[in-house]
Amino acid sequence: MLTLERIWQDLRHGLRVFVKAPAFAAIAVVSIAFGTGANVAIFSAVDALLLRPPPVERPDELITVGTRVDRGLGSMLRMSHADYVDVRTRARTFEGLLAFGFRWVGFSAAPGQAARVTVAALVSANYFQLLGIEPQLGRTFLPDEDRVPGRDAVVILSDDVWQQEFARDPAIVGRIVRISGIDFTVVGVAPRSFTGLDLYNRHGVYIPLAMWNQVMNSPLANPLEDRSLRVLTVDGRLRSGVSLVTARAELSAIGDDLSRLHPATNTGRAITAQTELQMRFERRPLDTHTLVLLSALSLAVLCVACANVAGLLASRAPERAREIALRLSIGASRPRIITGLLAESLAIALVGGAAGVGVGYAGIVLLRQIEWPSELIVYPVIQLDERTMMFALLAALGSVFLFGVGPAIQTARVDLARAMKANDASQSKRLRLRGRNVLVATQVAMSLAVLTIATFVFQIFQRELTAGPGFRTSHIAMARIDPMQARYTGEGSLRFFEQAVEQARRLPRVVSATVASEIPMWGLELTSMVPEGYRLADGQSGVRIYSSSVDESFFATLGIAILSGRPFRATDAAGSPKVAIVNEVIAARYWPGQDAVGRRFQLKDARGPWVEVIGVAKLSTYVYTGERPFEVVYFPFRQEPRGAMMLLAHTSGDSRDLLDPLREMVRRMDPDVPISDAQTMERFYEVRATSINGIAVSLIGGLGIMGLILAMVGLYGLVSYAVGRRTREIGVRIAVGASPYRVLGMILQEGMRPAWVGLAAGLVLSIVTARLLPALVPIGHRYDAATVLAVVPLLLAVSTLAAGIPARRAARVDPTVALRTE
């Protein structure tokens, strides 16, 4: 209790000290507010995308189990249903193992109503029990509802679907709903707090895994038994006292046994386990690496802020020397003095941290504008919640050690005899100036590095937006349709798409129409191939590429140029020789100096069918702005059919006017076929490219400007402090004939010295950081010297201004007044 009382006394004393020095207190508080605010904003995103635990019981105990599956821009642990059953039966280190996957399905609140698209989670019967989730209505799945394929058509609704479709009708249990053209009986409603284990897909309904065949309407013979179909996420809880290392050893042994029993599908497929946090890091490496970069930049801003406050505190040490000496002379110990000074620093940190919450909230508002242009894929909510507030407090407390400990120890090291003499208050002046010079040089170096990254990112986005994405971004309306959700077979789906394209072309002011399984910047299918004449590395079965299935009008509709060869034709059908169009990256890499048209490759591996290249398409943007060049191959959709397809219509008028006619056209064709993500290409490109790039530039640029302001405040404070300590000397120089310009040059030269040192160190740091950036975030642009050259003059000009203002004040000192000082 005594300790708390002393801390409270020290805090009150510190506040009184700062009230007497309002300018000092304001600069210190604003500096810490900038530093903590930047970190609060970035932490809110890191927490939402990586750190926030799923809304289940004991989330820290969840372990993901499976075989590593490469998704091109990330990897994850996945498992087939047959492997899951074997592992669940044999594993002894887990309390239980659950499995789930998800699929977009057509959902109707009642048979006969038009279907809308929602996300269906296909889950094992123990899914809710193992997660500790209790329904708010009805029950969860029974164990025997996951044993017989296709028998139990039961469903649990999410709270969102219950609200949107049934207005929270308490009599919903027992009602019949329609999913993928099949009648399901509602047996329960999930709690409002539970939205599923997938961050980016908010589940609308939950269906037993045993209904997988019926819901997917897959052309595969039996996905419940196909061991090559690894699309399920398997999570489990370890038994008490069992370590992750032990569980991995057991899973490895089980994986080896499955490889021996099923060599065709399981050879080389090791089974392992990882934590939820590890899984999130590896699933979306681009997001993860971007967050790491932003975290590093925000931490740099905090360090600059703390260096700024540390310099301010160090400059006050001479002024407080007599006070500290007096307290020591009447019996206070040096540890007690240091504790008191740290309490004063704590007061700065707490007030600055509170103000930093406001700065951080402004950043959170900016981050909330990031979205995915889809009805079904959502970004996790970035919010100022109790976790973010706790981080703000910890950041403020941590800053005390960064800026408070050094000055506190320095201030407490006072010589009693010299400090009590009024004229000796300037002891150790050179040492203090040297220490502040180091702090200012560090601030300038860090600010230059942050500004260089901000400029580099801005240049990339500006260059990409100026050059364009390589496809038409206006006068296109689009919508995603999935006939297989209405029980269409593979051949029936092809005919439905052909009819949809033909009817879309007849709509008013439609120039052309097309269908594609994937479109630029939406995402591409990952597959593999073996190019003719290309030597694979040892152990490599094929090269990984991205692909999309499109029809013969795709390239003309989207304005993607065919550089050589021909586009697809309607005759490129199932019975004709397999053909493909590759982009120029594939052509240059695998057939350099040759005409790729007429060359061949084998699909998937050396045992796959031969495919002839009939055209080379111009490179465009496929996933994100500034990406490295991707290898992409296009297939005619009649030869490589996919389930859902995107229907795109190029119009001579406003593309918004075509959205309702497209929806109505599909409903007239078949009301059971779900249509989703109906939007214009203008909005899609705005969200995927222009908007998110603007947010990134604003965020990184804001961090750079914060660092610049703080560094310049530090430099201004350093020169002002030096001028104040040398007022008498300056007066003498002017009195004996020194011109104001000579004094101005002298002070400016000394003030700019740490800035020059910081610029030199910052150049090295900027070059290293910019060269490492492409390794952290896979971008197709390299650092060039022009980036730094664009930043250095700005930083130099602002540094000169920050040092020049107090230097000019020194040059105008009145010798008569100056000689009376001290």
Image: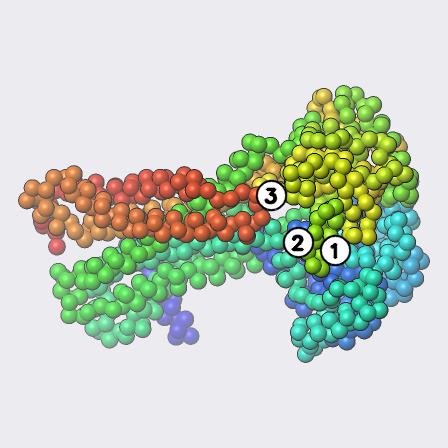
Visual colour scheme: rainbow
**In the rendered image of this protein, does residue 351 appear above or below residue 626?**
below
Give the residue displayed 19% in from the left and 69% down from the top. 415
**Displayed quadrant of residue 480:** top right
Q: Is residue 416 visible?
A: yes
Nearer the observer, 64 or 456? 456
Q: Amino acid at mark 3?
A: Glu
Q: Which residue is mark 1?
A: 541
Q: Amino acid at mark 2?
A: Gly
Residue sticking out furthest to the bottom: 241
**In the rendered image of this protein, does residue 620 appear above or below residue 17?**
above
Q: Where residue 688 sits in the image (x, y, percent)? A: 63, 39
Nearer the observer, 502 or 816? 502
The disc, 3 or 1, on the residue closer to the chain's N-terminal end is 1
* Horizontal side, residue 560 vs residue 166: left or right: left
Q: Which residue is mark 2?
A: 74
In space, the residues marked 2 and 1 are separated at their CA atoms by 19 Å
Q: Where residue 388 sits in the image (x, y, percent)? A: 54, 56
Q: Is residue 166 visible?
A: no
Categorize mark 2 by other alpha carbons within 10 Å: few (<14), some (14-19), many (20+).
some
Categorize mark 3 by other alpha carbons within 10 Å: few (<14), some (14-19), many (20+).
some
Nearer the observer, 42 or 745? 745
Give the residue displayed 23% in from the left and 44% down from the top. 748
Q: Which residue is mark 3?
A: 627
**In the rendered image of this protein, does residue 675 appear above or below residue 238?**
above
Q: Amino acid at mark 1?
A: Ser
